[in-house]
Image (cartoon, rainbow, N blue to C red):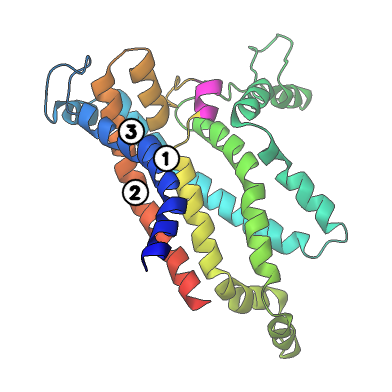
Amino acid sequence: MRPRASWAALFVGPALLLLGFYLVYPAINTIWLSFFDASSQHFVGLANFRELFHSPTMLVAFRNNLIWLIVFTTATVSLGLALAVLTDRVRYESLAKAVIFLPMAISFTGAGVIWKFMYAYVPPGGQQVGLLNQIMVSLGLQPVGWLITQPWVDNLALIAVGVWIWTGFSMVILSAAYKGIPRELLEAARVDGASEWQVFRFVSLPALQTTLAVVATTMIINVLKIFDIVYVMTNGNFGTEVLANRMYTVMFQFQDFGQASAIAVILLIIVLPFMLVSVRRFRAEEGQR
């Protein structure tokens, strides 16, 4: 056993050291700093957390993260599932999936810049440079300030960018699971007189439940950490602030390391249960194989 343990330590040891240095130590240090003041010199206990939960800006950030969580997750998973089923029936399946997946190849910052131009707004009477408002004007409608209309339009406009990026990812994962459903089950249901909707609802959907849960959990973890799109397009202005962007602002603009660390701890606490659920589900799937 000793030689085997030595070999295991030799291979696993460096990885554990790197994980400890880059993940565990920063997490512990961040938790420690969250109990100190802005300069990290004086211990203030839970004062940073109390102040965050009484801050109007933070309450807006919590609200927006909840909006992102509900709308983004529902849209990406639903559209991904619909596209996975539909593309399975088209002749040029690979091409269709490649086009839908293409936004994933663009950095989130790049996507934010692209869509900021798409949403660009010029007051009525001026020459519109944004594609969406140019279409609105061409149809005889008034241009819309997509990113400056509070409190719903601007948030939904930002969420649409996230959905545009991540729907392709959901589609690819769900498509692989959909193709794994035995075709005999689908054909048997059709032979028994089931409509296509009944086949999907009573055969395909139950078979995809585990994969749907995994994709939904992944989307939830991603959306709770959303930063790039909001930072590039609005920087949290006009009621679009989210937790990750607020953490960045407090850290690098206000130089308040205590509150920034407290926000990071709150994010960690929110994300951790979903990560544990994802790990447990992965272990359960591995145990069934």
Residue drawn where x is 71% and y is 75% of the image? 196
Q: List x then y, in percent, for residue 125.
A: 70, 9
Marked residue nearer the N-terminal end (3 or 1):
1
Residue drawn where x is 17% and y is 28% of the image? 35
Query: From which residue to which does the magenta span run?
Result: 228-234
Residue 201 in view, yes or no: yes
Which amino acid type is shown beneath numbered disc 3? Pro
Marked residue nearer the N-terminal end (2 or 3):
3
Which amino acid type is shown beneath numbered disc 1? Leu
Left or right, 29 with respect to 242, comes to: left
Is residue 244 covered in magenta? no
Label 2 Cα crowd, 10 Å radius (few <14 / some 14-19 / many 20+): few
CB-based contact (under 8 Å), mark 2 and mark 3: no
Left or right, 50 with respect to 283, comes to: left
Q: Quadrant of residue 189?
A: bottom right
Q: List x then y, in percent, for residue 36.
A: 17, 23
Q: On the image, numbered disc 3 is attached to which residue? A: 26
Residue drawn where x is 66% and y is 40% of the image? 104
Q: In the image shown, does 47 or 10 lie closer to the viewer?
A: 10
* SS for callout 1: helix
Residue 162 to residue 40: above or below: below
Label 1 Cα crowd, 10 Å radius (few <14 / some 14-19 / many 20+): few
Left or right, 74 with respect to 197, comes to: left
Q: On the image, numbered disc 2 is attached to which residue? A: 272
Residue 18's disc is 1
Mark 3 → mark 1, Cα distance in angstroms: 12 Å
Q: Quadrant of residue 158?
A: top right
